Amino acid sequence: RKEVEQDPGPFNVPEGATVAFNCTYSNSASQSFFWYRQDCRKEPKLLMSVYSSGNEDGRFTAQLNRASQYISLLIRDSKLSDSATYLCVVLNDYKLSFGAGTTVTVRA
Amino acid sequence: EAGVTQFPSHSVIEKGQTVTLRCDPISGHDNLYWYRRVMGKEIKFLLHFVKESKQDESGMPNNRFLAERTGGTYSTLKVQPAELEDSGVYFCASSHLVGSGGIYSPLHFGNGTRLTVT
């Protein structure tokens, strides 16, 4: 079983729509969780950390469910510039484990 | 603040040749990581340095890969001899300890080196 699993998508949504997707992780002792964004042929960039209580950063909301071992990301009022691959990333000690990514395409 | 820089950005070599990738972490970041993404797969951990010491190299695929970080600053990753399956994007990342509680900052990634072995 993979350490981090994500629905690869793609999620094709119109501008202004809300899109949400999850990822699951296998190690119940995982300590920290992140969403990274990766544009085509670019490096992963930190989008936001994910906290147990859930957290928002502008149009982005992240949730963590430790009991069910999943993390979610919700994007409200989608913009064209939100089109990217979103990587679910889990930290165990010092080592990051990456999901394969969820592709989101926002269309005009 | 300068980010993590990697060189070269692209490298095309023939099977059997040697390639050396370089990574300059963010200044002051003791932790340096190498990751790679091969075609169609997720990004996978290769190894982790704390300063000049290899903390964990469990992700290194085989002994054709050699990573060094002399002096605890920049790092090199050498592939010798390269094989076709080594093609992919090699990312370097760095982080630092936040406070005294053993918490690391999120990783900052370099742009990656796209390696093509033909």
Image: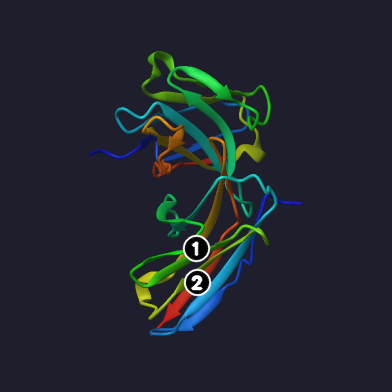
Vertical placement of residue A104 versus B75, above or below: below
The vertical placement of A98 against A65, above or below, is: above
Q: Residues within 10 Å of mark 1 (few under 14, many from 20)?
A: many
Q: SS class of the residue under badge 1?
A: strand
Residue visible at 42% across and 44% down? B106
Q: Are marks 2 and 1 in contact (CB under 8 Å)?
A: yes
Q: Mark 2 — on which chain does it sit?
A: A
Q: Residue at x 43, y 24 (%)?
A: B75
Percent of width and height locating residue B57: 61, 26
Callout 1: residue from which chain?
A
In the rendered image, residue B7, in percent from the top left (x then y), is placed at: 38, 34
How many neighbours does mark 2 have within 10 angstroms: few (below 14), some (14-19), or many (20 or more)?
many
- Tell me the colour scheme of the image: rainbow
Label ID, residue A104:
2
Q: Earlier in the sequence, mark 2 or mark 1?
A: 1
Question: In this rendering, would A58 be left or right of A94?
Answer: left
Quarter of the picture containing the C terminus of chain A is bottom left
Give the image quarter of residue A23.
bottom right
Q: Is B22 or B16 nearer to us in this picture?
A: B22
The disc label shown at residue A51, or none: none
Could you tell me the amino acid type at mark 1? Thr
Question: Residue A85, which numbered label?
Answer: 1
Q: Position of residue A85 (x, y in %)?
A: 49, 63
Nearer to the camera, B10 or A52: A52
Q: Residue at x 48, y 82 (%)?
A: A13
